[in-house]
Amino acid sequence: PLKELVSLISSGVSAIDEELKQLSNSYGDKQAALQDAKRKKGGNLMSVDLNDVLEEKVVKNLKIFDTEYLKTVFVAVGKAQVEGFEKEIYNLGGELVGYGGPDWSRMPNGLGQPTNFGSQVDRHQKKGSPVVPGSLEKVMEDNDSVLYTITVLKGMYEAGYYEGEEFVPGTKIDLLEAFAKILREKRYAVRENFTYDPSQQGKSAMMMEQLQVEVDNMRSGLTRWCKTHFGEAFVAWMHIKVIRVFVESVLRYGLPVDFTAVLYKVASGKDAMLVNALDKTFGESVKDDDDLDDEEYHDFVLIKFEP
């Protein structure tokens, strides 16, 4: 039966199409990773792998902290922004940290003694930046940008307090992410999650070479796959066209089946000449005024096929 035959052909082509999508997505992802590696390799200090450009003797002279409370962050700044960055860095994020505390002037005898202040103390009465004063250091520069280090507070603890007999636990606020967001808004490149490791030098180049090999292999495999399956998909498409010719001819001329199917190969740009010649041979082309799709109508079944 034609319905089952069409369904069988369509399912085979759908399987080919689905496999092609999966292979194409895998190839696209690998190619994107290669392009990203090339961008980092040939980029400036805002994007390049810092392990490839930093020298060990330079890093040894830097004051780098990664403690419970402090974190040293690498920031790359475009040369056009250097002056403004150095002027404002200690004021950035001035609303993030609360430096307020108890007013000891009212109770000097309690200074240094364990005292429960609870919710009566407003930590945010006095605010400031999380950047440690004097921590800005220039590391290196290239033609486009300058690399700095700054040390910032990792977080801030909001003390717990009692509400009657019930204790409300304190909370810890992450300052690093909030401060990094402020830097990005200023178009400063925060080199987050970077930790200097001299053993990583040169590994990005090796990784890029490996990615190039993988991309080339995947391209060759995808090309071979397409050459193999193109013929199968083409034959399936031709079968669908032949079935359509049969169905439309039966609908046009009725039963019993008595028609001839012919395949014409037309040179580029000559299809209109062929259609006109067929119209003159088998009857004039007539437009059906009731045809809402405004399609051509001929005295013969005409199906165009453009592989």
Image (cartoon, grey):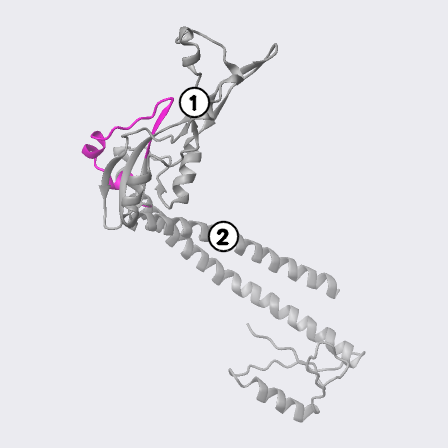
Return the residue nearer the eye: 282 or 119. 119
> Taking 139 as reference, is 6 above or below it?
below
Query: Where does label 2 land, which residue?
Result: 25
In the image, residue 174 above or below residue 83: above
Residue in the image at 37% along x and 52% along y: 35
Q: Tell me if I can see residue 205 in this picture.
A: no
Q: Kindly state the secondary structure of the residue where label 2 is placed.
A: helix
Location of residue 8 with respect to 239 vertically, above or below: above
Task: State the mark number for residue 100.
Answer: 1
| x and y, in percent, of residue 117 in the image | 50, 13
Q: Secondary structure at mark 1?
A: loop
Residue pictured at 55% horizontal, 54% vertical = 19
Closer to the chain start, of discs 2 and 1, is 2
Specify the quadrant that holds the C terminus. Answer: bottom right
**Which image quarter: residue 191?**
top left
Q: Residue at x 58, y 86 (%)?
A: 272
Q: Is residue 291 left or right of residue 192?
A: right
Q: Is residue 258 left or right of residue 261?
A: right
Q: Which residues are magenta?
A: 47-73
* In the image: residue 117, left or right of residue 46: right
Quadrant of the rendered structure where residue 108 is? Answer: top left
The alpha-carbon separation of the residues under discs 2 and 1 comes to: 54 Å
Name the disc covering residue 77, or none. Answer: none
